[in-house]
Amino acid sequence: MTFKPLLNLTAAVCAAALACVSAAEPAPPPFGDKVRLRGDFQNARITFERTGKGTVAFIGGSITEMNGYRPMVCELLQKRFPKTAFSFVPAGISSTCSTTGAFRFGADVLGHGPVDLLFVEFAVNDDQDAHHSREECIRGMEGIIRHARQANPAMDIVMTFFVNEPILKTLQAGQSPLTIEAHEAVAAYYGVPTIHLAKEVAEEITAGALTWEQFGGVHPAPFGNAICARMIDELFSRAWAKPLAKEAVVNPNMVPLTPLDPLNYASGRFVDIAEAKVKQGWTLAVPDWKALKGGKRLRFTSIPMLCASEPGAEASLAFEGTAVGAYVVAGPDAGIVEASVDNGPVRRVDLYHAYSKDLHYPRTVMFADDLASGSHTLTLRVAADTKSAGHAARIMHFVAN
């Protein structure tokens, strides 16, 4: 007796069954865990659909400021909600990091009114511009998220990780870049969805499906920005796949009582330079940019600044909080300042940046970041020595937390 026909039949039945099972299994979602949906993420949608209005803000560096992923996402939202009148707030400023973002968040984002949906992008600038430590990444990013949620608990937030060459190499080596790991820790703690564009690009390049040139580099080409937009659209599709339930209500996003870093910049704000008391050598005026060497960005050339250019120039500032610093433009002549709080130890801060050689570069420098909560007085002097072509200090805003 032979069992071959029976064995063949059994094999055929099994194969057919497996094929049916495979056909029944849904295809894996596009981009896998590189698009990470956290939380309910329905609040903005409820507002867009039921009120016919919506405010969407974007904060970040030059990747956000440029004509890139931001206008693409605006178009996606308008297509998803054609009956909604959107107000889009573009709060990207080239070269700025999450520290600056935390201090300007109130003015540049919340200053435009209540925000329903916020996009945050600082992974690249925290890496290549600020050279932040993990602690600095946490303080800035956590400050933005806590400030946003405290101002409007209903606000939905999306954090996006873009990519530069060092971040790309780190990912291809199977490691997590410092800035992305730190920002991801904040996102996980606060239940914020993330778009890991950097990982997607690294995987596609490693697989030979994409080149760095095609992507467009640090400031992506339209092709590269479109990848990010598709990933964000996938997030929307996962969160909003089903019709909005009639009983759906806006749910506040609770802010944990205990932060990741107690010294985060959640209370970060600008302090008017006019509040400074000048002892000698400082003037409040728009700098004479034509007389100054180095590139200038138009957004800064009409702003009055607290300026000094000679050693020994001294001013003081009374402020409230646990931290104090200054939002400056630092060009080829940027000097060194000596900062003291409440007549305590002097901290020397070099305003000159690696990018200051040919550009009046915007950056936030901190004079103290671990003070006891309460009233303090900052004393600021221009140092006698310098590592640049001058001793200049040009302050757009003091910052405090």
Image (cartoon, helix red, strand yellow):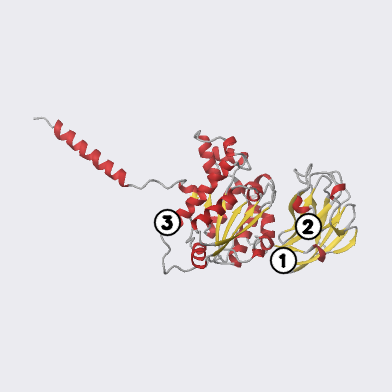
User: Could you tell me if the residues under marks 2 and 1 are in contact, i.e. CB atoms within 8 Å?
Assistant: no
Give the distance between the C-alpha atoms of the residues marked 2 and 1, in whole angstroms: 19 Å
| Residue identifier under label 2 | 396
Q: Which comes sooner in the sequence, label 1 or label 3?
A: 3
Q: Which of 33 and 375 is in front in this view?
A: 33
Give the distance between the C-alpha atoms of the residues marked 1 and 3, in whole angstroms: 45 Å
Q: Which residue lies furthest to the front in this view?
A: 83
Q: Residue at x 88, y 63 (%)?
A: 278
Q: Nearer the viewer, residue 292 or 226?
A: 226
Q: Which residue is drawn at 52% across and 43% down?
A: 200
* Residue 356, quarter of picture: top right
Q: In this view, does 85 lie above or below 23?
A: below
x then y, percent, for residue 144: 63, 59
Of the two numbered discs 2 and 3 in the rendering, the one whose residue sits closer to the viewer: 3
Packing grade of label 1 (10 A; few <14, some 14-19, many >=20) is some
Q: Which of 208 and 350 is in front in this view?
A: 208
- Regarding mark 2 in the picture, which secondary structure is present there? strand
| Residue identifier under label 3 | 241
* Quarter occupied by the N terminus: top left
Label placed on residue 202: none
| Residue identifier under label 1 | 321
